[in-house]
């Protein structure tokens, strides 16, 4: 997958947040996670397949193997293959039902919405774009004022476009997110005394490769100094 935490993606997400907040009262936050659940079952399945293949190879090989090797080596091979599969994010997605992936992403996104203090904005105008790389999905969680003001059908279409853009990388996802600005501006126009309550920096989960987590909002929902 294309980068979600490189310089180009960070710049694109920053501009998307600023575009939304320039035109509307929404307080937008973007967070990226490597995965929303451990999906251990996928690696166990891959390890079992590796063990079976290793055992079959030993049985049909012209090279003679000791009985102890026939018992132990396939297990070792399975463990190694299972561990190796943890670095391939697609394995989790390929071996997990899409409904389970979606549920895990939704659950993690809603937890992040509260953990990052987005639920505590004064006008209940918080908006979280949560991106989960392994599941290749995005979820948009909105507070009560945004939910009440935005037309449901139009909003659902826009969110679906963001979700589909994840497969095309960080910059494409950021552009799809920025496309929410006109709808938010119409539903929640920005007031002259609007105050930026949340950090505009990209929030990165601690397990995203090659990334450093940006500081999140404190317990009062304010961006740290």
Image: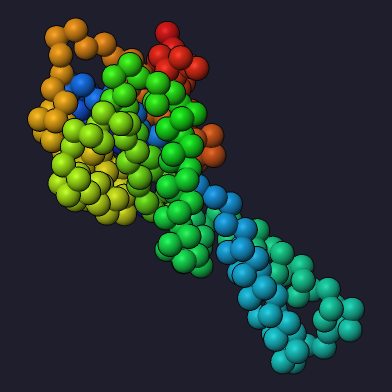
Residue 106: x %, y % from top left: 42, 47
Which residue does the image show at 49% across and 29% down from the upper left?
115
Is 192 situated left or right of 95 in this image?
left
Q: Quadrant of residue 185?
A: top left
Residue 82: which quarter of the image?
bottom right
Q: Residue 45 in the image: x percent, y percent?
A: 62, 70
Report x, y in % for residue 221: 42, 18
Q: Please say which color scheme the image uses.
A: rainbow
Query: Can residue 173 be seen in this snapshot?
Result: yes
Q: Judge by depth and name the residue closer to the eye, 79 or 134.
A: 134
Relative to 21, say whether 77 is above or below. below
Q: Is residue 195 above or below residue 8?
A: above
Relative side of 208 to 195, left or right: right
Give the percent coordinates (x, y) of residue 1: 37, 52
How many labels, in total? 0
Look at 26% across and 11% down and name the residue there: 195
Q: Is residue 35 visible?
A: no
Residue 71 in the figure: left or right of residue 146: right
Which quarter shows the C terminus? top left
């Amino acid at each position: 997958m294309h980068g979600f935490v490189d310089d180009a993606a960070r710049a694109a997400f920053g501009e998307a947040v600023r575009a939304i907040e320039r035109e509307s009262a929404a307080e937008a936050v973007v967070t990226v996670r490597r995965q929303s659940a451990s999906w251990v079952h996928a690696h166990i399945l891959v390890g079992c397949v590796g063990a079976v293949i290793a055992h079959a190879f030993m049985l049909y090989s012209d090279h003679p193997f000791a009985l102890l090797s026939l018992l132990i080596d396939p297990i070792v091979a399975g463990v190694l293959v299972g561990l190796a599969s943890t670095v391939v994010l697609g394995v989790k997605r390929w071996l997990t039902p899409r409904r389970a992936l979606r549920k895990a992403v939704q659950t993690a996104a809603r937890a992040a919405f509260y953990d990052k203090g987005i639920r505590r904005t004064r006008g209940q105008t918080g908006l979280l774009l949560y991106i989960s790389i392994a599941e290749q999905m995005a979820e948009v969680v909105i507070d009560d004022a945004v939910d009440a003001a935005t037309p449901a059908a139009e909003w659902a279409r826009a969110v679906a476009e963001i979700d589909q853009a994840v497969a095309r990388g960080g910059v494409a996802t950021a552009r799809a997110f920025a496309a929410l600005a006109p709808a938010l501006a119409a539903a929640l126009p920005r007031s002259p005394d609007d105050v930026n309550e949340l950090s505009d920096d990209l929030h990165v989960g601690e397990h995203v490769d090659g990334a450093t987590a940006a500081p999140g909002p404190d317990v009062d929902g304010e961006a740290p100094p």
